[in-house]
Amino acid sequence: MQAPMSVMKVRDLMTTQLVTLKPDDTVKKAVLKFALDNISGAPVIDGRSHLLGILSQNDVLRLVMATQDRIEREHPDSEDLLVHSMDSVDSNARLKELTDEISNKPVSEVMTRTVLTTTPDETIINVLRSMMDLQVNRLPVLEKGVVVGVISRDDIIFSLYKRKV
């Protein structure tokens, strides 16, 4: 039987098969990783697995919306950025330039640098409370300064009804 959430630790539910990003990965590479791995964000780490930040769909969409706002200010009659796929804008040179700018931007310029983290020994209920209060979907799990996992709302919600065999 599974331990109650007040006793259950992060290490009991965290994902250790991590999808991570490097600071020089492009936004396009990150978004493709998100899609292929069915995730909405990932830690950005250096060569020694130290946390540099986290990139989420929200970070990418904020970049897209900031670019859209810039388009509307500069060219009020221009097409919306999202009318075309980011990799298939050929008819409008200015839109192509802007989508390339977004796609090729390094993750380090878009990621959130101040990241709430946790440890493997923290209780699930405390982590969940923090995630709900701060409206975050995932927390990197650090041990001795190294990213060893991620705990997400998905990990927690799916554990509510998962039977241990």
Image (cartoon, grey):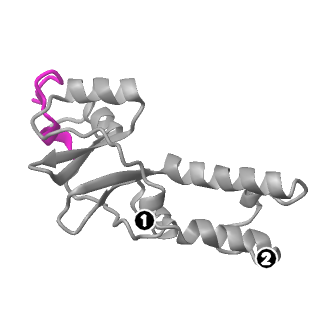
Q: Which mark is residue 93?
A: 2
Q: Which x, y percent locates residue 54? A: 36, 51
Quadrant assignment, res 127 = top left
Label 1 sits on residue: 33
| Most common SS among magenta residues | loop
| Label 1: element kind | helix
What's the residue at 48%, 67% (across, down)? 32
Residue 6 painted magenta: yes
Question: In the depicted view, which residue is nearer to us: 127 or 45?
Answer: 45
Q: Is residue 34 visible?
A: no
Q: Which x, y percent locates residue 1? A: 9, 29
Reading the chain from its start, which is encountered first: label 2 or label 1?
1
Q: Is residue 28 left or right of 99 when viewed as pictured?
A: left
What's the residue at 41%, 48% (across, down)? 112
Q: Pick the quarter of the image with the C terminus.
A: top left
Q: Which x, y percent locates residue 120? A: 12, 41
Q: Is residue 72 left or right of 109 when viewed as pictured?
A: right
Question: In the depicted view, which residue is nearer to us: 20 or 6?
Answer: 20
